[in-house]
Amino acid sequence: MIIGITVICCMLLFSLLVGTIYFSKAKLKNTENKLYSRLFIITFFGLIIELLCFYFVYNKDISSIYNILNEFINRLFLIYLLLWEFLFTEYIFFVSFESRLKFKDKLKHNRKSILITLSIIYIIMAAIIIKLPLNYFNDGKYIYSYGTATNVLLLMGGVFIFIDIISVLSNIKRASSKKYYPLFMLVIMMIFVFVIRQINPGITIINSVFAFVTIFMYFTIENPDLKVVNELLRNKELVERQMEDKSRFLFEISQDIKTPTKNILGITKNFDKLDNDIDKKDAVRLISSNANDLLFKLNNVLDISSMDASKIKIKEEYYDTTMFFKTIESMVQNAIGNKNIKLKFEVNSNVPEKLNGDDVKLKQILMSVLLNSIENTENGFISVNIGSIVRYDVARLVIKIEDSGVGMSLDKINSILDDNMELTLDETNKLNKLDMDLKATIKVIKLLGGSINIKSKKDEGTTFMIVLDQKCDIEQSSNFMKNVEKYSSDIFGRKRVLLVNDDKEENFKISNILGEYNIDLNVSMTGKDCIDRINNGEFYNLIIIDDELGETSALQTLNELNKNNKFKIPVIVMLKKDKEHFRKYYVEDGFKDVVLKSDLVNELEIIINKYI
């Protein structure tokens, strides 16, 4: 008895120390951390309940009240042990399957029903334990409970451990991960507990083992500092990969813009040297084709102001882009068959994992174009590159398909692209097939609000560029930014300021001033962009708006921001010296304060000291 109580007291004090450290640190807000926090809290209270068990079993014969309390406390302790096993299994199950997209989807969309189901299962198990007989042993030296209730609890514990092991085995490739160390430790120690219990049931250390495993988790996988560092490293890798893909994407687009520009300059330079009208007509057609190609890149690809979620045909469910494009790749590879064609299929990291749009018609569009390429290419290559431009809740897919096939004449390209008629009855009947002709495909692209451009030369191959906007998962697309915001604020102590100003020189000056205060400055050029940022969940400690914005005034922007019920960020307005006498009117309109541009250094220092 003395050994058991001593061990419990030591574990209780150690848990108190580790818990104080753990809960005082900034932590990532994710499911894994929430599960561990619950596990730690109930472990601490479980140790207290076990101490009470010793006390009441030892004194249960003093009075009937003590006997009732003894029965209640011991039953409560068994329910606690069941709850610990339940939560630990939930934790192991989650870390085993968290990387699987299907599991994430089901967890996200069925969270409430899953919680209800788990709660019902636990209540049934707890009810069984409460109803079963429970006996007590006390000879002055050893104190413990035994009986059918404890035996069933041990059996349930064995079932939980079996589920844990199955979870690990189903992810055998990740079995060496540190996330499974606590499970290995629990299995080893539970075998030790079982052997000790067979030798001497009076040595009760099962709960101390649970507490040890919980604390062991803190030192191996749940240390907040290590998790933040690991998450920072992971996000750093993601950013570097996305920046690399973005740089490559912009480089390719810039090259695509330079090519038609050079072609136009080359043709116009030699235009005067052309003698007959036929050559001049061909030159004009080439100029027109290159100009259209250039205009397509500028208007349909790079013009992000046209990205509007309200124009997208939304479906009830998002689709997984990884699985979607892998399916397309597999289907194309099968369609190539024995042809001597090398397929290169690349999806950039800047393409969101989840999109919402008509994925069925998107599949028809891609497969129709790709099957056309396969049909017109005997040997060589087919290259598919999917990139995206993401702006808040819209992702613009830019899909480039190249082949080394027979190519098309300029007349044929123009005849395909210039067909503005609606879908014919025959084309409509083919909408449930993957293989449509190019004219019908282009009509479907336009039907979805997208656009397509075709470049080709006879016997040199064809390049298709398809641009289509899809709805983004706002939560997913802003998760990284939210993490950055959290690290910037909680870990590095940096405050975030949004500057809304379209004057580049002023922005540069303000950036230098705020840089001395360890402030993370973000710049927005328009009031609309500022409103979109806030409505899409971006957090700032302070917003500074120039009164003389191009499209919307500072007051119009503030009024739009205030329509958001959750908006509570202080907004400062920047004024020229000649408007200083209007200061009180701006404050009455809702601005927290005013900054005069004539003395930015001192004015910003006052604002920072006052509001940050």
Image (cartoon, rainbow, N blue to C red):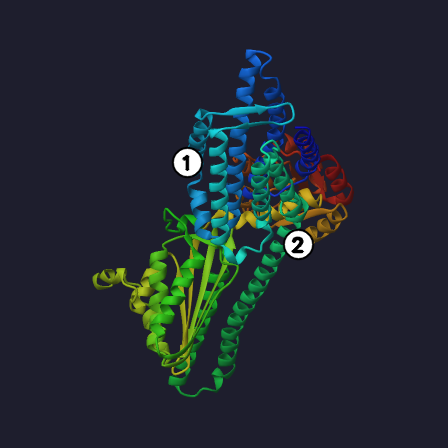
Pick the front one: 465 or 264: 465
x, y percent for residue 126: 46, 29
Residue 559 in which image quadrant = top right
User: Residue at position x 45%, y 73% from top?
Assistant: 290
**Which element is circle 2 on?**
helix
Residues marked 2 and 1 touching at CB (< 8 Å):
no
Residue type indicated by callout 1: Thr
Left or right of 26 on screen, residue 296: left
Query: Which residue is the site of mark 1?
Result: 117
Q: Quadrant of the C terminus?
A: top right
Q: First in sequence: mark 2 or mark 1?
A: 1
Indicate the position of residue 118 as horizontal and vertical percent values.
44, 36
Position of residue 553 measured from the top left corner of the image (x, y, whole percent):
58, 42
Alpha-carbon span between mark 2 and mark 1? 57 Å
Q: Give the vertical position of 227 relative to 75 (above or below).
A: below
Q: Residue at x 36, y 59 (%)?
A: 362
